[in-house]
Structure formats: C-alpha cells, structure tokens
Image (tube, helix red, strand yellow):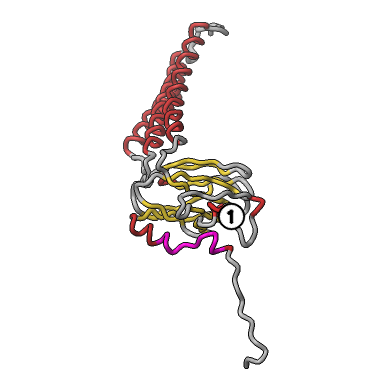
Amino acid sequence: MAVALVLVLVVVGSILFHILSPWWWSPIASNWGYIDQTLIITFWITGAVFSAVVLFMAYCVFRFRHREGVKADYNPENKKLEWWLTAVTAVGVAAMLAPGLYVWSQFITVPDDATEVEVVGQQWQWSYRLPGQDGRLGKSDNRLVTYENPLGIDPDDPYGQDDVVIEAADLHLPIDKPVKMLLRSIDVLHDFYVPEFRAKMDMVPGTVTYFWFTPTRTGTFEVLCAELCGTGHGYMRGIVMVDTEEDYQAWLDGQTTFAQLSAPTTVGVMDADEP
C-alpha cells in the first residue's frame, strides 16, 4: 500500500510541479514558433504516457500484493493485450512524429526571396560571408583556405569578388527578411545554434547544410556551438545582431569585400638619397 501511494504521489507531484512552475522559454526571435508548439505536444504525450505507466504500476502493486492463500497465475502470453499495446504505442509515436515532420518540411523549404548568408565554422570561431551588389555568393573550396583567404573563396569566380567577408566578428541581419543560412565547416564537426532563433544545424566538413528563418525582433543574440569540437568548444561563441533596415545598411556599408581583402598592398620604399 505504501509503495502504491508513493507512485501515485509521484504522478500528482509531477503534474502540480508543471502547473505551478511555468516553463521559462527564452524569448523567441524568429518565425519558428512551430518548434515550441512541437515540443509542447511531445511533452504532453510523453507526460500522459508517464502518468499512465506509473499509475498502472501503482494499481498492479496494490491489486496483486501478497495475500495469504492467494496463488499467482502464470500467464506468459496475452495476445489481446499485446495488440492493444502495439496499437496505442504506434498511435503515440505517430502523434509525436507528425508535427516534427511537418515543421521539418517547412524548415528546409526556403522562400524564393530569402537572402543567402554563409556561416563558416572552424576551431574555435565563427566567420560569415554575405553576397555583394550582385546578390550572389561566389564559389568556395576548403582547399583554397589560406591566411590571406580564410574562407576559401574562389578568386577566379567573378561572383565572389564583391562578397562581404566577416572573419571572427559579429553578424548583423535585417529584421523581417527571410535568411537562408548556408553552413560550412573547414576543419571538424560544428553546430550553429542560436537558441532564440529556434534553429540549429550540424556543420559537416566537405558538405554544405542549410536552414532558413526570418528574424522577427531586433536585439543581440548569442551564437553557440552545439557539437563537441575540441578543447575550445565551450568558448566557441559569437553574436548575431538583428537590426532595423537603416542600421543594417549602415553596418553593411562599413564591411570589407573579398576583392578588397585580396588586393595587393604596396609598401613604400625610401630613396637612398632621402634623409
């Protein structure tokens, strides 16, 4: 009886804790409220299963407790119960998968008017590349990465000359405009994650992954690496700032293009007759 009562109290206490202690979501700053809704659906389904299983355990402990003169009945199979458990489990799993698949379909279906922004991860910093006046990103290749060309941009591709290069600095984005994030790693596995955007994706060397979102509120948001990438993993952080259109253009005008970075620098030589 005591064990059964403890199990019932566990269920009641869990429900009361959820009701009296509200979830403190981080402020959402993108269009992906669908992800929060999916998490809530998953929570309620798993919470209902947890409550049902624990209450069933409490019932079994009490109903089939030891009593003098009562002999246990050995029943190794129950086809009816097995079919019911299989059906209920299948419905529960489908109920959890369906919202996630729906959101995933939207997550990778990029709007035609989305602006491309490349995110480059390396131990242990974030760099970015934005399209220039032509609106297109040039080609890139990890084999082209050098000290002078840290993002491996193809110098022979004319579309890459006006690309805006942001190395180990903050990224700015305009508010209310969809953005397609192209994710590339030049060394090991990384994961670009901004909690307030409800968006994250692995960055796999040798391939380009992507997702899209629309910033919906201005502010400063922290970038985290959500994939263990070495001893400096915990320090691989960055900043994404969502600006008004005016502030974004002012910031963009002050950035450096790939052509400017790769332009040869001239060093003045002093004439021998000069003092």
Q: Which residue is mark 1?
A: 151
Please rate how many residues cluster around mark 1, counting C-alpha atoms within 10 Å: few if below 14, some from 14 to 19, many from 20.
many
> Which residue is located at x 49 percent, y 57 percent?
164
In the depicted structure, whether residue 12 falls above or below residue 211: above
x and y percentages locating residue 42 in the rendered image: 42, 29
> Where, by quadrant of the figure, is residue 50 drawn?
top left
- Location of the C terminus by quadrant is bottom right
Let me know if residue 60 appears in the view.
yes
> Where, by quadrant of the figure, is residue 47 drawn?
top left
Residue 57 is covered by the magenta coloring: no
Residue 255 is covered by the magenta coloring: yes
- What's the residue type where badge 1 is placed? Leu
> Which residue is located at x 61 percent, y 45 percent?
189
Let me know if residue 168 appears in the view.
no
User: Of residues 88 and 167, which is closer to you in this image?
Assistant: 167
x and y percentages locating residue 261 in the rendered image: 56, 63
Q: Is residue 24 left or right of residue 169?
A: left
Q: Which residues are magenta?
A: 251-261
Q: Main secondary structure of the magenta part?
A: helix
- SS at badge 1: loop
In the depicted structure, whether residue 78 falls above or below residue 251: above
User: Of residues 61 and 273, which is closer to you in this image?
Assistant: 273
Q: Is residue 246 left or right of residue 100?
A: left
- Location of the N terminus by quadrant is top left
In the depicted structure, whether residue 234 falls above or below residue 256: above
In the depicted structure, whether residue 31 falls above or below residue 52: below
User: Of residues 81 and 107, which is closer to you in this image?
Assistant: 107
x and y percentages locating residue 10 in the rendered image: 41, 30
x and y percentages locating residue 185 in the rendered image: 59, 48
Q: Is residue 210 left or right of residue 155?
A: left
